[in-house]
Image (cartoon, grey):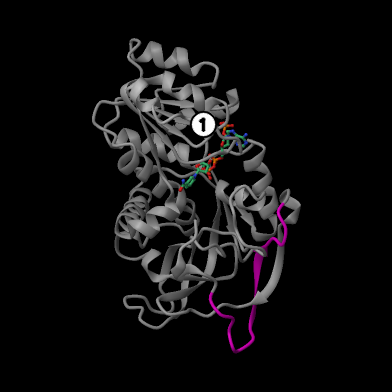
Amino acid sequence: MTNTSETPAPSTPSGSRMRTVRFESFGDPSVLAVAEVPTPEPGPGQITVDVRYAGVNFAEVMFRRGQFPVDLPHFPGLEAVGTVRAVGEGVTGLEPGQRVAALTLGGGGNAEVVAVGAEHTVRLDGDLAGLDGALAAGALCNVTTALGVLTSAGHLAQGETVVVLAAAGGVGTAAAQLARTLGASTVIGVTSSPAKAEYARGYGYDSVVSYDEIEREVAERTGGAGADLVLDSVGGAFRSSVTGLLAAFGRHVVFGNAAAEDVTFEGNHPWYTNSSLAGYNLGGVAGRAPHLLRAHLEQALAEVARGTVRVDVKVLPLKDVAHAHELLETRASTGKYVLDVRA
Ligand SMILES: NC(=O)c1ccc[n+]([C@@H]2O[C@H](COP(=O)([O-])OP(=O)(O)OC[C@H]3O[C@@H](n4cnc5c(N)ncnc54)[C@H](OP(=O)(O)O)[C@@H]3O)[C@@H](O)[C@H]2O)c1
C-alpha cells in the first residue's frame, strides 16, 4: 500500500520532535513502540497534518507481522484527521489551520504529525464541516474500501444478494450499509461468534450467521440460486468454498487475507464455475486510478457525515496502539479503533 507521493518527508530543519508509533522488527504487538522522532516537513505536492485522530486497520497488523512487505523501521498509520500544519511546494487549495482528513497510504498516520500527498487529503468544510474527527478517521480506509469493493470490483447491481465475510468489522459494517444503499435486496453477514453476529445485526444485514452456516443460509435465502457477490477479506481454507456460495456469474471479490493463509485457483476455475474472481487494493487504486479513489474517499466521508453509513468508533490513546492490534488480530474486535494522538 505504498504511494510515491507519500514517502516519508525530510525532517524539519528546526529540529522539533514529535511522538509516533514505530516498529523496528516484525513480530507480535509488543514490537510497537511510541517513539520520539524529528517532525516531518512537507515535500513537493505534500502537506503536513497536525494529527488528532488516527485509525487502526487490519492492514497494519499484516505489516507488523511481516505478512505484507514494508521497510523497517516502519511507521504505521494509513489514515489521519487533524489540521493542516504546513503546505509544500505546488499544493493549492489547502492552507495551514484547515481541518482535513487524509489517507496516509505511505504510513506514518499514527503520529502527532504526518506528511501526506495533497491528492489524498479532503478538507472537512462545507457539508463535511460537522463531521466528527474520530468518525472521519474511522471512515477513511474502511468506508472507502467498502465502496470500492462493492462498486468498482464487485459491480453490485439492484436486487442482488451480497455476502459479507468478517461482517462485524470495520469494512464489514460499512459494506452492509452501503450494499443496502446501492440497491442490494439481500445482505448476509458471516462472523466467527454469536456475540459478533448480534453486534453485526445492528448494521443492516438481513441475517448474520457463522462460517459453518453460510452455505445453508445462502441456499435458503436465494432458493438455491446462490449469492451474486461475496466480499472476502478473510482468505484461508474458507476461500476455496466461496465459489460454492455463488450464483451463476457471481463475483468473488478478494481484498484481504486476515487468515494469513492463501489458496490456489487454476486459470480455468472461472470458466468451469461460471464465476468471476475480482480484487481490490486501496494502494493500487491510489496509484492507477487516483481520481476514482478520490471520488470514493469523498463519497465515503459524505455518507458518514449524512449518517447514511454509521461507523462505530472506539477511541483509545496513542499509547494503546498495541491493544488495538491485539483486539484486531485475535478476532476480538468489532467496529473500528481510532487513536487519539493527543491523549
Ligand atoms: N484491499 C484493501 O485495500 C483493503 C483495505 C482495507 C481493508 N482491507 C482488508 O479488509 C479486512 C477488514 O479490515 P478491517 O480493518 O475492517 O478489519 P476487521 O474486519 O475489523 O478485522 C478483521 C476481521 O477478519 C476476520 N478474520 C477472519 N479470519 C481471521 C484470522 N485468522 N485472524 C484474524 N481475523 C480474522 C475477523 O472477523 P471474524 O472473527 O468475524 O471472522 C476479524 O475481526 C482486513 O482483512 C483488511 O486487510 C483491505
Instruction: Pick the quarter of the image with the C terminus.
Output: bottom right
* Residue 233: % across, % down: 50, 37
Per the image, is 5 magenta?
no
Q: From the viewer's perspective, tell me whether residue 266 is left or right of residue 316.
A: left
* Residue 171: % across, % down: 47, 41
29 versus 89 height, above or below:
above
Mark 1 is surrounded, within 10 Å at the Cα level, by few (under 14), some (14 to 19) or many (20 or more) other residues, namely few
* Residue 107: % across, % down: 55, 62
Q: Is residue 189 visible?
A: yes
Element assignment for label 1? loop
Looking at the picture, which amino acid does disc 1 mark? Answer: Thr
Residue positioned 52% across, 16% down in the render: 213
Residue positioned 71% across, 68% down in the render: 35
Q: From the viewer's perspective, tell me whether residue 40 is left or right of residue 171.
A: right
* Residue 126: % across, % down: 30, 64
Magenta span of residues: 9-26
Q: Quadrant of residue 274?
A: top left
Q: Quadrant of residue 292?
A: bottom left
Q: Is residue 123 visible?
A: no
Prevailing secondary structure of the magenta residues: loop
| Residue at which label 1 appears | 264
